[in-house]
């Protein structure tokens, strides 16, 4: 059965930000339970980008600890050589948006939500998803609120997440792009995501700005961007962008890559975006390994695919200073 | 008293008191007439002044009327000049908008070029590392 919603998340068992696995499993269980309770037919598309060979895979951890999630989990393990072959920045440890594209490309849902592995969906978001009112060529955005939940995060519930006393930072999102924490929530119909060919795969020097760059591309391609009027919740941790941007000398930790004009230059990914041509090998039910092949690797340089936004449409994008 | 008046009156005479009273009345009338005459003179002066003013204004108006055709010609000329300036201003404004747009577009192209250079530089770095590793 085709799920109405695919939730694309990426990660790997490398302890990113401290207790990554704990945050990942808690939010996965929480989101699955809330969506199930509200009757939203969904799948999780988990992309493990260059997973370490000496540690258990996240998908295995899900199977062990969250058997109820297993039936709705489609997992893709990307051969680590893709990272080496695709990266244009040796400081970039993780190619978040290439990983997301792998998931978006293979997601089956009528709507696709790309989010991060430590994001709790708010009650308003789930209510919105229950309504099933996803319009085509519309990008839905939600604000991200950082929460501090204390030592015990094992019993998270909406009352706790939505209690303003637990909120540490809150960032409003504003038209026209509604940017700001965009990597945590970008929702649109599958056809729309495919017509835009996912996130930028040409400029592979940075992780920062790729999400807002997607919004610029969508907006300048005539997509509507709207705020669904509800929040998603994130628990602060070491290494998160909001924390690391205040610590590093240049305002960015090296794992985030270069600052670049993400609001001015967009991209035209090739047809093979999302490692389309990577040979797929089924490991077990619900888990696929993407074997390495140079045929699937985009060229190091493809300058014709870095372009100005396709149509300005008389729209002003510089005013929105979300990220 | 009235008998005395009658007797004196029969001879064309009058009492001194009566005469004084009549003289006083005559004086008052004379004073009043003098005042009225003075006022009348002032009115005359005022009207005269007004008449002079009106005459002057009339002269001016006639002079102005004479200059109306010239003024109309001047007005037409200025209007034509004004229309020309308005058209020039609109053209300049349009040129400025085009220039701003071209500048913005140039900046965007510059950003795109810089971004492409970043990619080229990064790619060269990757190739360099790969080359060194293989040697």
Image (cartoon, coloured by chain):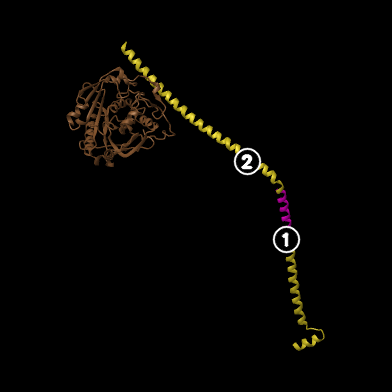
Chain colours: A brown, B yellow
Say the numbered circle drawn on residue B79: 2
Residue furthest out toward the top: B135
**Magenta region, main secondary structure:** helix
Say the numbered circle drawn on residue A95: none
Q: Is residue B89 left or right of residue B56?
A: left
Magenta stretch contains residue B52: yes
Tag 2, which chain?
B
Q: Is residue B43 above or below residue A198?
A: below
Task: Name which of mark 2 and mark 1 comes first in the sequence.
Answer: 1
Label 2 crowd bin: few (<14), some (14–19), many (20+), radius 10 Å: few
Visible residue check, residue B1: no
Please report the residue visible at 30 percent of the width from the left and 39 percent of the height from the top: A230
Give the magenta-colored segment's residue range.
B49-64
Please report the residue visible at 33 percent of the width from the left and 13 percent of the height from the top: B132
Please report the residue visible at 17 percent of the width from the left and 30 percent of the height from the top: A65
Magenta stretch contains residue B30: no
Quarter holding the C terminus of chain A is top left
Asked which quadrant contains residue A89, the reply is: top left
A268 vs A153, nearest the viewer: A268
Label 1 crowd bin: few (<14), some (14–19), many (20+), radius 10 Å: few
Do the residues indicated by labels 2 and 1 lie within the same chain of the protein? yes
Q: Position of residue B45 (x, y in %)?
A: 74, 61
Q: Is residue B112 left or right of residue A29?
A: right
Q: Position of residue A192 (x, y in %)?
A: 33, 31
Asked which quadrant contains residue A161, the reply is: top left
Q: Is residue B8 left or right of residue A237?
A: right
Q: Position of residue A244 (x, y in %)?
A: 32, 30
Say the numbered circle drawn on residue B47: 1
B117 vs A289, nearest the viewer: A289
């Amino acid at each position: 059965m085709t799920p109405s919603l695919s939730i694309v998340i990426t990660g790997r068992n490398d302890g990113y930000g401290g207790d990554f696995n704990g945050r990942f499993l808690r939010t996965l269980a929480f989101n699955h339970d809330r969506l199930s309770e509200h009757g939203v037919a969904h799948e999780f598309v988990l992309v493990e980008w260059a997973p370490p060979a000496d540690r258990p895979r996240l998908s295995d951890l899900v199977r062990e600890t969250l058997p109820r999630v297993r039936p709705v989990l489609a997992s893709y393990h990307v051969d680590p050589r893709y990272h080496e072959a695709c990266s244009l920045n040796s400081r970039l440890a993780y190619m978040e948006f290439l990983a997301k594209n792998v998931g978006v490309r293979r997601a089956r849902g009528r709507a696709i939500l790309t989010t991060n592995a430590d994001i709790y969906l708010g009650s308003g978001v789930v209510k919105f998803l229950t309504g099933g009112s996803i319009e085509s060529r519309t990008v839905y955005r939600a604000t991200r609120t950082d929460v501090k939940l204390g030592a015990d995060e094992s019993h998270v519930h909406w009352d706790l997440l939505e209690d303003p006393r637990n909120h540490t930072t809150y960032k409003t999102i504003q038209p026209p792009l509604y940017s700001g924490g965009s990597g945590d929530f970008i929702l649109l119909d599958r056809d729309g995501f495919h017509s835009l060919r996912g996130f930028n795969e040409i400029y592979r020097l940075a992780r920062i700005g790729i999400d807002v760059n997607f919004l610029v591309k969508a907006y300048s391609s005539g997509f509507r961007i709207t705020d669904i009027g509800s929040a998603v919740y994130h628990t602060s941790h070491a290494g998160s962008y909001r924390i690391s941007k205040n610590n590093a000398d240049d305002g960015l930790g090296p794992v985030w890559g270069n600052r670049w004009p993400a609001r001015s230059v967009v991209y035209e990914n090739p047809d093979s975006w999302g490692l389309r041509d990577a040979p797929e090998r089924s490991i077990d039910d619900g888990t696929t390994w993407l074997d390495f092949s140079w045929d699937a690797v985009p060229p190091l340089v493809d300058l014709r695919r870095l372009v100005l936004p396709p149509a300005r449409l008389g729209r002003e994008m510089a005013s929105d200073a979300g990220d | 008293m009235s008998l005395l008046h009658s007797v004196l009156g029969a001879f064309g005479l009058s009492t001194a008191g009566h005469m004084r009273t009549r003289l006083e009345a005559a004086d008052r009338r004379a004073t009043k007439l003098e005042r009225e005459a003075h006022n009348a003179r002032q009115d005359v002066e005022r009207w005269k002044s007004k008449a002079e003013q009106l005459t002057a204004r009339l002269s001016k108006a006639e002079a102005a009327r004479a200059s109306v055709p010239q003024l109309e010609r001047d007005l037409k000329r200025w209007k034509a000049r004004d229309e020309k300036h308005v058209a020039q201003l609109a053209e300049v404004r349009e040129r400025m908008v085009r220039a701003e747009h071209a500048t913005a577009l140039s900046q965007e192209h510059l950003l795109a070029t810089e971004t492409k250079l970043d990619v080229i530089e990064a790619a060269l770095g990757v190739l360099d590392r790969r080359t060194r590793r293989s040697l």
